[in-house]
Image (cartoon, helix red, strand yellow):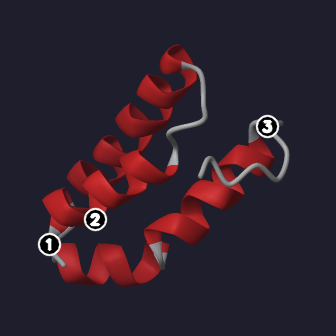
Amino acid sequence: MDRREYLLAFYDALDDLPHDVKADVMKEYNDYFKTGTEQGKTDEEIIASLGDPVALAYAVRQRKGFGSSHGR
């Protein structure tokens, strides 16, 4: 899985969030990739540090106060 595939899977897993919240979250994680590559990390290393995109989306929903909905 490359960066684009990872972020698409993550985006899809956030489908139950309000648009503005989803946009903020996606900017945050796009910036995370940008910062990581600026620090010399590969996309594969960054993806490994983030873990499964669906699990990450679940954790983000919890952190943002959107409960345990899976959006599916």
Q: Are marks 2 and 1 in contact (CB under 8 Å)?
A: yes
Picture quarter with the N terminus: bottom left
At mark 1, the secondary structure is loop
Q: What's under tag 3, amino acid-wise?
A: Phe
Q: Which residue sits at x=49%, y=29%?
A: 22
Q: Residue at x 60, y 31 (%)?
A: 17
In the rendered image of this protein, does residue 37 appear above or below residue 11?
below
**Mark 3 = which residue?**
66
The residue to which callout 2 is attached is 6
Residue at the far front in the pictured view? 72
Nearer the N terminus, badge 3 or badge 1?
1
Residue 33 image point, x, y percent = 27, 56
Q: Residue at x 59, y 21 (%)?
A: 18
Among the two numbered marks 3 and 2 on one chain, the one whose residue lies closer to the N terminus = 2
Checking the image for residue 26, the label placed there is none
> Pointer 1: what residue?
2
- Quadrant hosting residue 37: bottom left
